[in-house]
Amino acid sequence: MTLEPLLSASPAIKIHVVAVLSSALLGAYLLLRAKGTPVHRLLGKIWLALMVVTAISSFFIHELNVFHGFSPIHLLSIFVLVACAQAILAARRHDIDRHRRAVTGLYFGGIGIAGGFTLLPHRIMNEVIFTGRETLPLLLLVATAALLGWFLFSGKPRGTS
């Protein structure tokens, strides 16, 4: 693992990576904790803002130049912006089922699926994770699993206020 490809990347890529990693961690926390609380609402607003920053910053990333600087992955960014608007509108209308579908789709589609594409060969995150010393990706995986375990098993059970 080496951070060199990321450190030498454009500012748009750096902003994108910070926003998506922050939204991935915060989103996991929100999905696993009690819903409808004031803390949930505040952190949810921050999470949606991070998702919007993630999507908008992607429009300034043109490593995969398929069509005038854009690629099919940019369609996912449009999906993220639309889904963020749907999540906000649904929450304001107290349409909890629609809100839940929107944010779940955002998390697993906008972060999970898109994150999978970043691990393809010749992409920056592939270079970050899979080059350099081979033990570091394993340590990163273990640290991520430990953090997820902490979110799952700490504090009040999910669904309580």
Image (cartoon, helix red, strand yellow):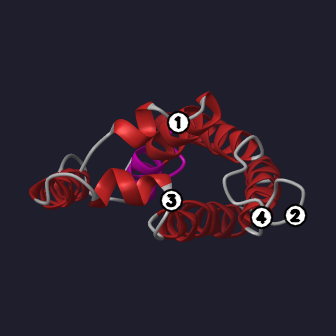
Cα distance, mark 1 to mark 4? Answer: 18 Å
Could you tell me the amino acid type at mark 3? Arg
Position of residue 45 relative to residue 152, above or below, is: above
Could you tell me the amino acid type at mark 4? Ser
**Which residue carries the number 2 mark?**
67
Q: For the magenta stretch, what is the residue range?
A: 24-38
Q: Is residue 69 visible?
A: yes
Asked whether the beta carbons under mark 2 and mark 4 sit within 8 Å of each other, the answer is yes
Q: Residue at x 18, y 49 (%)?
A: 154
Q: Earlier in the sequence, mark 1 or mark 4?
A: 1
Could you tell me the amino acid type at mark 2? Phe
User: Could you say where residue 27 lies in the image, as x and y percent from the top left?
Assistant: 47, 51
Could you tell me the amino acid type at mark 1? Ala
Circle 1 packing at 10 Å, graded few (<14), some (14-19), many (20+), is few
Q: Earlier in the sequence, mark 3 or mark 4?
A: 4
Circle 2 packing at 10 Å, graded few (<14), some (14-19), many (20+), is few
Position of residue 88 relative to residue 113, above or below, is: above
Circle 3 packing at 10 Å, graded few (<14), some (14-19), many (20+), is some
Q: Which mark is residue 123?
A: 3
Instruction: Judge left or right: residue 76 versus residue 119.
Output: right
- The chief SS type of the magenta part is helix
Cα distance, mark 3 to mark 1? Answer: 11 Å
Q: Quadrant of residue 67?
A: bottom right
Numbered disc 4: secondary structure: loop
User: Could you say where residue 38 lies in the image, as x and y percent from the top left?
Assistant: 52, 34
**Which residue carries the number 1 mark?**
9
**Which residue carries the number 4 mark?**
71
Q: Residue at x 45, y 58 (%)?
A: 31
